[in-house]
Image (tube, helix red, strand yellow):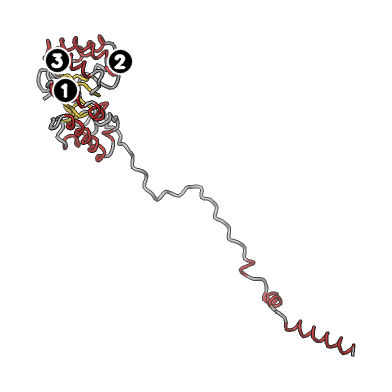
Amino acid sequence: MRARAVLATALALLLLGGCGDGTATDRRAAGPDPVASAPLPAEPAPSATPRPSRTAPPRPLVRPLPAKLPAGLRRTTGVRTVALTFDDGPDPAWTPKVLDRLRAARVTATFCVVGTQARRHPELVRRIVREGHQLCNHSWNHDLDLARRPVADIRRDLVRTNAAIRKAVPGAKVPFYRQPGGRWTREVVTVAGQLGMRSLHWNVDPQDWGKPTAATIAKRVRAAARPGSVVLLHDGGGNRAATLAACPHLITDLKRRYGVARLR
């Protein structure tokens, strides 16, 4: 009996081995898996030359300045009399004193006002007009690069400045625009013209912005002035004590030689 049991067990084991999962045997017969054994593709070597960007380069915020001043600038009065122009105000410390000097000398001038200053000190804009002086738009915040910016930005700036001036003096005439720093471009001249303003430059610059003495300012104006000159001075943007002190002397000299009047 024991011999039969052993024989039966051996036969069962033999049958079980023949009927089992033949996957491993089949794989060995078929050879290695072509997918599993295939080598991984080599990564491409980095290119020595970077690929060109498909996006366009960013648009420059400002254009280059022209090699020379554009056409269309007014640089003289067109008559014998000389015009005094005062930039960067109105300033509560200096503009009233400049206005006092002009009234004492019985002359009128042109004030190139900055929009932010006009908004802060509308009473000074009103006084300028009330005392017979001329107004000129000098940009919203004295942006030296304004004329080089996109045309839409230029227009927005000039319109905003005129609005501040006319809020102080409803219906005020603003016949001129002066670009800060004299950094003119054809675009800003065109926009100013479309808004009814002539672009106002100068031909006498005593550089009072450099803080010379009053005597130096008066001497420079006397040396450079000619019939019809437009003189650049400042009533804002810093300490204008020297400009203020120079005014009586240079006005007396210019009145004697040519006469002084506001621009028309």
- Residue where numbered disc 3 is placed: 103
Q: Which of marks 2 and 3 is nearer the N terminus?
A: 3
Q: Which residue lies furthest to the front in this view?
A: 123
Give the Cα separation between the discs numbered 1 and 3.
Answer: 11 Å
Q: Please give the label number shown on residue 78.
A: none
- In the image, taking residue 38 as reference, residue 13 lies left or right, namely right
Badge 3, how many Cα within 10 Å: few under 14, some, many 20+?
few
Q: Which of marks 2 and 3 is in front?
A: 3
In the image: residue 17, left or right of residue 63: right
- Label 1 crowding class (10 Å Cα cut-off): few <14, some 14-19, many 20+? many
Determine whether the residue tagged by mark 1 lies in a helix, strand or loop: helix
- Find residue 69 and report its image quarter: top left
- Quadrant in the picture for residue 207: top left
| Circle on res. 128 | 1
Q: In this view, does 8 lie to the left or right of 93?
A: right
**Residue type pointed to by label 3:** Arg
Q: Residue at x 24, y 38 (%)?
A: 156
Mark 2: which secondary structure? loop
Q: Position of residue 59 (x, y in %)?
A: 33, 42
- What type is the residue that disc 2 sits on? Lys
Query: Of 138 and 74, which appears nearest the observer?
Result: 138
Question: Does dot 3 land on a helix, a strand or a loop?
Answer: helix
Q: Which of 72 and 244 is in front in this view?
A: 244
Which residue is labeled 2 in the image? 211
Residue 79 in percent (x, y) is at 9, 20
The C terminus, quarter of image: top left
Point out the tag, 2 or 1, that comes first from the N-terminus: 1
